[in-house]
Image: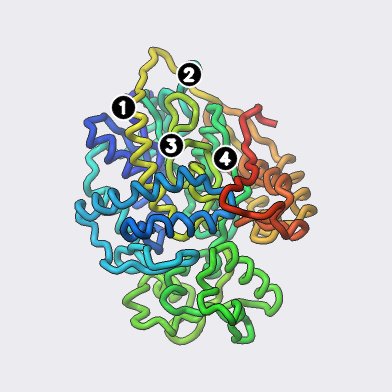
Amino acid sequence: MERRSADLLVLGAGVAGVYAALAAEERGARVLLVSKDPFPAGSTPWAQGGVAFPVGEEDLEAHLRDTLVAGRGLVEEGVARSILEEAPRHLERLRAFGLPFHPEPTREGGHSRARVFHLGGDRSGLLLLEGLLKRLSAPVVPAQALSLLASGNRVTGALLWGPEGLWEVRAGAVLLATGGFGRLFSVTTNPQGATGDGMALAWRAGAGLRDLEFVQFHPTALPNGALVSEACRGEGAILLNAHGERFMPRYDPLAELAPRDVVARAVFRERERTGGVYLDLRPIPRLEERFPTVVAQARTLGLDPLRAPLPVAPAAHYAMGGVRTDAFGHTGIPGLFAAGEVASTGFHGANRLASNSLLEGLVVGWRAALRALEDLAFPPKATPLPALAAPPEAVAALREEAGEALGVVRRKEALLAFLRQAEAVPLEEVERAGRERLEAGSLLLLMRLLARAALAREESRGAHFREDFPLEDRPRHSLFQGWRLAFLPVGVE
C-alpha cells in the first residue's frame, strides 16, 4: 500500500473542490486533490447556466429575497446573507484570474432581475472549471475514496483506490466536494459519477444528512437527460404542449421563468394531460451562436431546434439536501468538511434558486478550505471506517422505479412500496469493495433515507410535492423556519 500525507485532502474535483484547493494553496498548504473520474470531472462541466452574483450592493437585498422566496421558508437567512455578501469578492477574484465572464448578466427562473454571469454561452461550468484548473499546482490523484480514516472521533484521511492500487492518505483535514446523487434516478442531467459517495462517507463518519426529500427536477431535459438550459427560456424560448399551445399562465409573461419546482410540475402535469411537452427555441436570435451545446446535444438525437420544437421532460438535476454543515463547511465532525452539492448549508432551502449552486460552491469551498487549515491535526494512528456496499443489479432495478416513486409528484402508496423494495436489498458494511458495489451502496442508503424523508414530510414544499398533501403545512412568512428532517447514523439495517 502506498502512503501519502497532506495538510488538506480534497475529495472531488468540481468547482467547490478545485476552488478549495486553490484557497489552501494560496496559504502555502500541502494539498492533495482526488478525482474519481477523468477531467473535467463532476457536475460542474455540465452546468450550462452561469453563476448568480448580486449586481452591486443595491441588488443584495433583492437577490436575498429571491433566494428566500424560492427556498419556501427553509432557507437559513443568515447563511444566505453571508454568502451573498461575500460573493462580489469572488467575482473580482475570478476576473483577476482571467476568466472571460460576459459583461452583461442574464436572467433565469426565480430571479427578479438579470444577475447570472455566463462564460462562453452555455459552456459556463466547463470554462469556469478549466480556468480554475489552469491555476492549480496541487497534485491530482485519479482515484475513488473507499473509506475515511479516523482517530477517535476525528477524520484523519482516506483510503483510495486508483490505477496503481491502494493508497492511504493521512491528512490534517478532509474536505468532501463529491457532488450529489442524481444517478439515483434513471433519467438525470447528472454525470455517471454522481452517486452520493461523499454523503455515504460522511454518514459512516458520524455526520448528519438532512433535507434529502428536496430533489430539484430540471423542467426541460431532452429524452436522454441532456439539459436544455433555463437561460434559453430567459432569452425567449417558449413551452408548448402536445397540441402546440402555450400552457404556462397566460396572464404572466414571465411565468416560464417561475422557480424550477413550479415549472417542473407544470411540465409534468401537461405531459400527463396532452401526451407531451416541447420547448420552442426558434424565437431566440442567433441560437447556434448563443447555445451551441444545446443545439449540438439535440442534433445527436436527430433533432433540429432550428426547425422544430424539442421534446422535453423533467429530469433529476440537483440535491438541495446533503451533509449538514455550517456556513463554513464544517460537518460537526473534527477534521471533516463539505462544500458544494454534497453539503447542506441551508442556502437553498426547499428549492434552489437558479445558478446559486456554483456561487455556493465557490464561496463555501473557499471558506471551508481556510477553516480547515485553522484546525489541522495529525494523530499518530488512524483506522479505516467501514464502507457501504450493495449488489449493483438490484440497485439498478430500483433506479428504474425511483422516477415514479421519488419523482416530481409523490404519493404515499408509491413511497411505501419503494421503501419496502429498497429495504429488502442488502446494505453491507465492508472493509473495501469495487467501484460498482460501493456506488450501489451509496445509492441504496440514499434511496432508503430519501423515501423515509418524503414519507415523513406530509406537506408540499418547494421541490417536494405530495399529491396527497398538496398544501404547505402552515402559512409562510419571513420569520418562519419550517421543520427539517436530519438523519444521524444508527448502523446499517
Name the image quarter holding residue 217. bottom right
Q: Looking at the image, is mark 3 or mark 4 earlier in the sequence? A: 3
Image point (52%, 29%), residue name = 432
Q: How far is disc 2 from disc 3 in space, using C-alphas?
A: 24 Å
Q: Looking at the image, is mark 4 or mark 2 earlier in the sequence? A: 2
Name the image quarter holding residue 32. top left
Instruction: Say which mark, if any, is on residue 329.
Output: 3
Query: Does the residue at mark 2 contact the one at mark 1 (Cβ under 8 Å)?
Result: no
Query: Does the residue at mark 2 contact the one at mark 3 (Cβ under 8 Å)?
Result: no
Label 2 crowd (10 A; few <14 / some 14-19 / many >=20): some
Instruction: Say which mark, if any, is on residue 383.
Output: 2
**Residue 18: image location, x then y, percent:** 32, 44
Q: Quadrant of the C terminus?
A: top right
Q: Residue beneath label 1, please?
A: 6
Helix, strand or loop for disc 2: strand
Q: Nearer the viewer, residue 215 or 300?
A: 215
Q: Does the rendering let one see residue 380?
A: yes
Q: How far is disc 1 from disc 4 in space, using C-alphas?
A: 26 Å
- In this picture the colour scheme is rainbow
Question: Does residue 437 sit above or below 460 in this rendering?
Answer: above
Q: What amino acid does circle 4 point to?
A: Ser
Label 3 crowd (10 A; few <14 / some 14-19 / many >=20): many
Label 4 crowd (10 A; few <14 / some 14-19 / many >=20): many
Query: Does the residue at mark 3 contact the one at mark 4 (Cβ under 8 Å)?
Result: no
Query: Does the residue at mark 4 contact the one at mark 2 (Cβ under 8 Å)?
Result: no
Q: Quadrant of the N terminus?
A: top left
Q: Residue beneath label 4, please?
A: 442
Image point (55%, 74%), residue name = 255
Label 1 crowd (10 A; few <14 / some 14-19 / many >=20): some
Q: Looking at the image, is mark 3 or mark 1 earlier in the sequence? A: 1
